[in-house]
Amino acid sequence: MLKRAIATGIGAFLALIALKNAGIIVSSPATLVQLGDITSPGPLLAILSFFVIAALLYRDFKSGVLISILLVTGIALSLDLVQYQGVMAMPPSILPTFMQLDFAAAFDISMLSVIFAFLFVDLFDTSGTLVAVTQKAGLADEKGNMPRLGRVLSADSTATIAGAVLGTSTTTSYIESVAGVSVGGRTGLTAVVVGICFLLMMFFAPLAQMVPAYATAGAILYVAVLMLQNLKFVNWDDMTDAIPVTVVLLMTPLTFSIAHGIALGFISYTAVKVLCGKQKQVSISVWMLTALFVFKFAFLS
């Protein structure tokens, strides 16, 4: 049940990101968020993108997401909403950030909280993403377990180390992978092809930079819809299931963190089960993770 909750929480998180990128939802000092100017070009084009994707994928056009992004970008370019910046350019040098590591600081006792915080975010962001993607791809077994999880986490951790050596921010799995899964990408070959395309795009950065955020907002919102379909599997008549799902569903987008949403979901799941006399349904692994999350919030927040 928690795995379904994580998937729905990520779906709600993606919906918030999409609406924010589209300018449909904007910040407000009075009410935290409010409706933006949906008559302006950005929100209108984002809405167009979403409906085009929905229509094309419903008719089994596998390239519906790409067509929508190109269409909206083309319209924005024709209306001078984005500026033409060229097609190709050499990528910047990595020398200023390559191997700029502070090994001495890593062994400083004061850095333990920082290291643990990064571990917490990376591990549980990745775990939540894997749960959502494997469920959508139909790769999980009947219990919702992920195949070859160790290999996946090894690849993710290797990428994190490589990213640090190159000087990038923490490298992790991205939930936007569900967009590829939704149109048939379910094997390792998909990841290889996407990786090659990313390498090639290093030389086409000016072209990629012309794609406005609202052009991809429709795709992200469509992925959110796919993720929220997991709500149909929740037993809403059992409050010990419904409450943790609701906590994850709300707290993941409101804290703007997959890891925090997962943590609060585990804590609420364990608390509700125990208080309702169903503690036998809480596995040892869930107890351990709940204790870890409580420790994190109590001492490392």
Image (cartoon, helix red, strand yellow):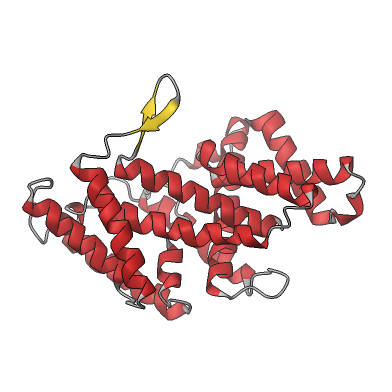
**Can you see residue 95?**
no
In the picture, the quarter occupied by the N terminus is: bottom right
Q: Position of residue 225 (x, y in %)?
A: 47, 58
Q: Nearer the viewer, residue 125 or 211?
A: 211
Between residue 157 and residue 52, name the one nearer to us: 52
Q: Which residue sits at x=52%, y=42%? A: 253
**Which residue is nearer to you in this view: 156 or 107?**
156
- Rendered location of residue 286, percent (x, y): 78, 52
Answer with the quarter of the image where residue 57 lies: bottom left
For the question of whether residue 193 can be seen, the reply is: yes
Q: Position of residue 187 (x, y in %)?
A: 47, 79
Q: Which residue occupies the foreground of this view, 150 or 60?
A: 60
Q: In the displayed structure, does residue 270 sit left or right of residue 301?
A: right
Q: Where is residue 41 shown, x and y percent of the image?
A: 19, 44
At horizontal 79% and vertical 55% (from top left) the residue drawn is 285
In the displayed structure, does residue 71 sit left or right of residue 151?
A: left
| Quadrant of res 271 | top right
**Which residue occupies 71% across, 30% down?**
298
